[in-house]
Amino acid sequence: MNQHEDRQQGFPAQQQQPPGLTDQMRPRPDHGEESYRGSGKLTGRRALITGGDSGIGRAVAIAFAREGADVAIGCLPAEQEDAEQTASWVRRAGREAVILPGDLVDAETCTRLVEDTVSALGGLDIVVNNAGFHLTRDGAGTLEGLDPEVVDRVLRTNIWATLWVIRAALPHLERGSVIINTSSIQAYQPAGVLLDYAATKAAINSITVNLAEHLGPRGIRVNAVAPGPIWTPLQPATRGPEEIAEFGSGTPLGRAGQPAEVAPAFVFLASQSTASYVSGSIVGVTGGKGTL
């Protein structure tokens, strides 16, 4: 049996304030701390992961490090505690880790994040745009419940930051470099309570395909991973307790996924040995929900 197949449907009712912290979650997510085994697919590579402190970002950081990459961890200042834990796992794998706090809602911070990454790691080969935000609590994601300030944050975090980070990174990316964006099942099967968030993820799909066409001649591959419901701090921080109790149970596999189940898709796309001819693709890790 797969180590995740016996996971319960749904989770104990719980709630946090955004952005949420891993240690307060019940149960704690599995980021592959004890299970991921690397095989040198990313030896000598240097990666920037936005939202790299927890959830999918932490799982990707651990997997990349065990594949041989040094990792820069972008995070909100309030997520420093989680970022320190992620960095410790990267260092245990024998790789360099640097924590770079900052809120990516403005272009200047995005540019500084990239420049600090290049300065700390000596270059940049892989960009993972994983930072994201949504809010469904008390109907905030429905048309009637949309708040201009919240929508502005969703757009700036999910779309603008993706564009500004890539723009800042391009001068440093050489042939063979990789950009991986984080999309969502919401780009394909949008929920009525995630109106603004779903729209941003559809936009990320478009950006991914567009940039793959634009950057292909420069030897830079651009892809995305579209997760389904994944157990990360974002969930108890942005959903009501009653939503958490049923989170993920509507998938064909009947449960939410763990971050450790998403990270291998990022490794696949980042590695020249497995995905050298893959660009402009969105890889679904959705628990059975369709991405057609």
Image: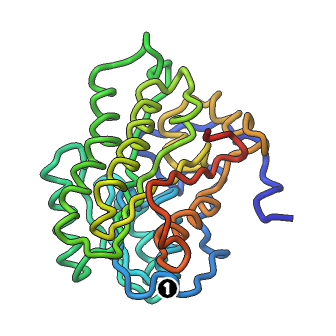
Identify the element where label 1 is drawn. loop
Residue drawn at x 52%, y 51% as measured from the top left: 282
Residue drawn at x 43%, y 14% as measured from the top left: 143
Q: Is residue 199 above or below residue 66?
A: above
Residue drawn at x 52%, y 82% as measured from the top left: 41
Residue 137: x and y in percent read: 50, 26
Residue 180: x and y in percent read: 41, 59
Q: Is residue 225 above or below residue 276?
A: above
Taking the image as shown, residue 126 lies to the left or right of residue 14, namely: left
Residue 210: x and y in percent read: 34, 47
Q: Residues within 10 Å of mark 1 (few under 14, many from 20)?
A: some
Taking the image as shown, residue 172 lies to the left or right of residue 142, namely: left
Residue drawn at x 35%, y 76% as measured from the top left: 176
Q: Residue furthest right?
A: 1
The foreground one among 289 and 211 is 211
Q: Is residue 217 above or below residue 37?
A: above
Res. 220 image quadrant: bottom left
Say whether residue 81 is visible.
no
> Tag count in the figure?
1
Residue 31: x and y in percent read: 58, 65
Quadrant containing the N terminus is bottom right
Q: Residue furthest top?
A: 144
Say whether residue 117 is visible.
yes
Quadrant containing the C terminus is top right
The foreground one among 251 and 88 is 251
The foreground one among 71 and 167 is 167
Instruction: Say what amino acid the circle numbered 1 marks.
Output: Ala
Q: How is the image coloured?
A: rainbow
Q: Residue furthest front?
A: 217
- The residue under label 1 is 93
